[in-house]
Amino acid sequence: MMNTFQFDTASLLLALPEIFLLSAIVVVLLLDLFLTKRFKQVTYYLTQASLLITGVLSYNLIGHPETVIFSNSFVLDDMASVFKVFMMGFSMVAMVYSRHYLTQHSLFRGEYFILVLLSILGMMVMVSGYSLLTLYLGLEILSLSLYTLIAIARKRSGAIEAALKYFVLGAIASGLLLYGMSMIYGISGSLNISDISAFASDANLGARETLIINFGLVFLVIGIAFKLGAVPFHMWVPDVYQGSPTSVTMFISTVPKIAAVAMLVRILVDGLGAMHAYWADLFMVLAVLSIALGSVVALMQTNIKRMLAYSTISHVGFIMLGFVTGVVSGYGAAVFYVFVYILISLAAFGIIILLNKEGFEADQISDFKGLSKHSPWFALMMLAVMLSMAGVPPFIGFYSKFFILQQVISAGFITLAVVAVVFAVISAYYYLQIIKSMYFEDADKDITISAPMDIQLVLSINAILILVVGIFPDFWMKLALSLF
Amino acid sequence: MTFDQILFYVFSFWFIASSLAMIFSRNAAKAVLFLILSFFSAASIWILLEAEFLAITLILVYVGAVMVLFLFVIKMLNIDKSTLRAKFTGYLPLGLLVAAIIIVEMTLVLGGNQFGLDIVTAPARHAADYSNITVLAMQLYTVYVYPFELAAVLLLIAIIASITLVQRNELNRKKQSISEQVNVQAKDRVRLVSITTPSKEDK
């Protein structure tokens, strides 16, 4: 199909959130230049305002019928709008936590917020990407901003190493992804997702076409698995999580996961849904390996950021299990899992950041010793977060795992479900270990919390949400299901 | 064999040969020169495919600008090649094995059985007045305007990122303060200090 040119104001309005965010970035970038040290906080408030307005603009577009604009390269559907709203919300929370960390470790610079905004723009492009080209460009906008965000703390030991490692491996993964895309383009003759879908679901597809699509598919799956951090493409995850400043680690491990899942849905479900039987096999292997390795290796960690990195890997395994099922309810469960994982993860990193003091980096599990005596409230929050990660009811983490396993079993993969449960039980050990050091061990150093009120308040709401959504998960689950 | 084919084989030969020479050359400056040759050969193959604009851009941008920059960097940095090579030869057997397996597998999938001329016909030649640049420009600024804008954002990130990473902190920056220089007083320049010799008990 030949791409026809279309460009009108009506289609510009559908891309309003992106257009607004890009304009806001340029304004903040220029304004930041003229702000003196005393008014540096203005950049932070402008960032939050831009995120809020972008979120509201995206929210207004929910319910708009699926429309493809910009000559088949941008799609606006409910999935895109809902994902964008959630991305803005989570990013705003992440920025509240980040500010405390940045001021404590003298990393508070205008560029930090600009780069975060740019990476969010990249994620929005990915979420709305409807051609392989825009998906790739969005991914690069996201990745380049993240590499820089890590390297921004040049004086920190490990930050440069983490940034370089992420950059080199990320470049290789992008190359593999591009190679896969070029194969799909070569055989289907189009970069557009709906054209690829029409080509792949053609009943008369020959053996040659199937072979080439599969060949491209392998590279696409590798590229996506790398971006998600699934085993065996997980090598970068622990080092990058540990080496980055905690606020960047928090950002990397949360919001971009939405974009990665959106890319997965666009390419593999929307585009190559007809090839599900082929990529589901690959996903099954990746999922089981991720859950197993993530759960077992985390047992040995003493650094909490490294531990959370391995925990992320095992959560990614669960997300991939949702896509193995090949049914709409399974995809919905996976998206629900992503939102829940981000909610929990933000709270976990928020509490780590809360323990940070000027010149002191709280990133060891032992830093949590005796937290219950000094701050019973935040120890309780951490308790909720850890139990939720382990999947204990009534916290939200239980339901996300439950929905995934329910779908996996009803799709007939009982062995897979058993393996996942066994490793989830093993992983409970290291979550409980943190609870043990908070409640049953005495502090060996002073851990008074000196964080400002805004972070304490947002953190409390975040942790309470983990319980509230856990008691009423219906609305969120229905929302996730309605996206497909 | 037609003249086109002869040209293709000549350019491809130099492309592959110079790429290999680039990897195996001991001298970084020579490697850059070989890389220029391989870019040049690739550009020639593009011209055979009637993609003149891409070919010229490759030569202008990569050979003309990027490679010159590379040469500058290599001349300015003192790269110790012996340590690099020690690792290289250590990984060589495994690397060769992996490369060989990948080449065999990829040939099986992408070889003549799937992409031979009898299956995928050669693209038709364009007329003499066909302009590659016009077609590209028409596509780029109409159909692909959204990806084009995104590429512009990528360049913006590159600028911000490089400035952010290179910029020193306020404290380390050495800049002239002209008003201070003008207002300097004699007593600011010379400071008289009386020094007493320390006695042995103080030691």
Image (cartoon, rainbow, N blue to C red):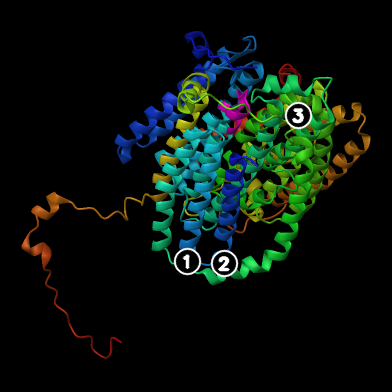
Q: On the picture, is A447 further left or further right than B201?
A: right
Chain containing mark 1: B
Q: Position of residue A384 (x, y in %)?
A: 71, 37
Q: Amino acid at mark 1?
A: Ile
Examine the rendering and report whether any part of residue A361 can be seen. no
Q: Amino acid at mark 2?
A: Leu
Say whether disc 1 or disc 2 marks the residue closer to the N-terminus. 1
Image depth: mark 1 or mark 3 in front: 1
Residue at which label 2 appears:
B84
Q: Residue at x 71, y 23 (%)?
A: A196
Residue at which label 3 appears:
A334
Examine the rendering and report whether any part of residue B179 can be seen. yes
Q: On the picture, is A306 further left or further right than A35?
A: right
Residue A333 among those drawn in magenta: no
* Disc 1 to disc 2: CB gap under 8 Å: yes
- Is label 1 on the same chain as label 2? yes
- What quarter of the picture does the N terminus of chain B occupy? top right
Q: Is residue B79 above or below residue A11?
A: below
Q: Residues within 10 Å of mark 2 (few under 14, many from 20)?
A: few
Q: Residues within 10 Å of mark 1 (few under 14, many from 20)?
A: few
Q: Amino acid at mark 3?
A: Ala
Q: Residue at x 84, y 45 (%)?
A: A423
Q: Position of residue A278 (x, y in %)?
A: 83, 33
Q: Secondary structure at mark 1?
A: loop
Numbered range of the magenta stretch: A125-136
Q: Secondary structure at mark 3?
A: helix
Magenta residues, dominant SS class? helix
Residue at which label 1 appears:
B79
Q: Is residue A325 above or below residue A61?
A: below
